[in-house]
Amino acid sequence: MNATSYRRIAVIDIGKTNAKVVVLDSETGAEIAVLKRPNIAIKSGLYPHYDVEALWSFALDALKSLAREPGFDAISITTHGASAALLGRDGALAMPVIDYEHEYPQEIRDAYTRLRPSFDETFSPHLTMGLNVGAQLHYQKTVFPKEFVEVATILTYAQYWTARLTGVAANELTSLGCHTDLWNPREGHYSSLVDRLGIRDLMAPIRSAFDALGPVLPDIAAELGLAAPVPVYCGIHDSNASLLPHLVHRAAPFAVVSTGTWVINFGVGGDLDHLDPKRDALANVDAYGRAVPSSRFMGGREFEILSAEIGLVDEKAAQAAIGPVIGKGMMLLPNIASGSGPFPGKASRWIGAEEASRQERSAAACLYLALMTDACLGLIGAKGPVIVEGPFALNGTYLKLLAALTGREVMALPGSTGTSQGAALLTGIRPVSGAETHVPPTAIPGLAAYRTRWHAAME
């Protein structure tokens, strides 16, 4: 990447749970301003869908405020994956942006199963709900043909927001390559599904995540009070945004555990030959267009559910409870959030927790999350140090357990999320190393045997 002279970059960061607009300082890498709101789906209408207009109003209000103080020189975009925007000939949405957690009727799912390409072609596992974007498009086209016939352009989700700001329609590889069924990562072109669905002519041109697609449109620039033209960069899938800073300055092999609603694991320097699609292992595509072995589970959502059940527990108390939990054989089995992850079809249950304290339940929850991550890393043959990004980087109990389970150093980046920093790098600024917490692997008595029992309890 060529370094630019941008001092401050505004990042629109739309996650599945929350949306935020951040201004990053290119010299320090710090988030010097953050505004956020919940991302809430609308349940009425054709199908559950994102409240795009509320998100747009929030983004414009935030940019207007941040343009005054602290100001910004460029805009970048990052969003969750598993979404596409369908535009009409007028450039507005022809159909709502579907919530990927919407499940389709069985006959629609069966028809799509017969239609979708093999894992060997797309490296996309067959996922539930709308987690394969191809399944969304098939559902929209099949069930709502009158609305779908009005579709003129199909965009990946991050690029929808870029298009609204610039008027330039584009698709981008990190979003096309995140389990959509639409991309062939080995060959670097669209999969056969695009023609089976008859949508090739609707797909917007592919642009690099690093491309500046244009300045903010004049009427929007006037509304925001921008004093000079501000370029808007193409944008990137959020987990790949977290990965990007490490690709820039770290030599393979290493693993990145990107945590948010989802825990996405990347095995940089690995290969695609041993991935098991039945266990949610897949290939993602990085910002440079390269396939990266990956695995995932809905760990952030699961931790949110567990935290609501258990309540707030002091971390020292949770760490002190690890030994007793292992000694008692108390454990939590997957899955709390069903429909994804390395152990499909399993229903969550507690073992030996009838009289457990809150501290013990908290320790067991951290053991569960660390064991799930360890299993995911094993599925992709991850090697080298493990870098943990996002909220789990603040969970010392989880980090200690993960280091012990993997036998490798864990490096925690305790910023709120790596997605905004990664998206800012699209503008060509240099990456800035932030604070890292290094957690070396230490032996925890009984942990290896506990892991064996945990896996056996699922059988």
Image (cartoon, grey):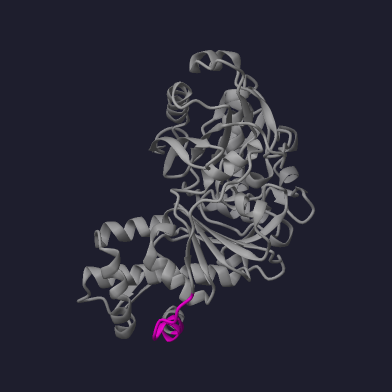
| Viewer-proximal residue among 422 and 300 | 422
- Image height check: is 413 above or below 102? below
> In the rendered image, which quarter is residue 397 located in?
bottom left
Q: Residue at x 47, y 31 (%)?
A: 52
Q: Nearer the viewer, residue 58 or 195?
A: 58
- In the rendered image, residue 270, in percent from the top left (x then y), is placed at 68, 66
Q: Looking at the picture, does residue 107 appear above or below residue 380?
A: above
Residue at 62% across, 23% down = 166
Based on the displayed image, in which of its 4 quarters is residue 314 positioned?
A: bottom left
Q: Where is residue 120? Give x, y as percent.
A: 73, 62
Q: Tell me the quadrant of the picture where the N terminus can be found.
A: top right
Q: Position of residue 411 (x, y in %)?
A: 51, 63
Residue 347, visible in the rendered structure:
no
Span highlighted in magenta in the image = 441-452
Horizontal relation, residue 324 to residue 12: left or right? left
Query: Which residue is the extreme one toward the right?
Result: 187
234 up-or-down from 442: above or below: above
Q: Is 447 inside the magenta-drawn segment?
A: yes
Relative horizontal placement of residue 303, taking residue 345 as reference (left or right)? left
Residue 319 seen anywhere in this rendered image of the structure: yes
Residue at 63% x, 46% y: name it.
134
Residue 452 coordinates in the image, percent (x, y): 46, 84
Callout count: 0
Using residue 199 as the reference point, say whether residue 366 is left or right of it.
Answer: left
Magenta span includes 302: no
Apparent side of residue 70 relative to residue 280 in the rendered image (left or right): left
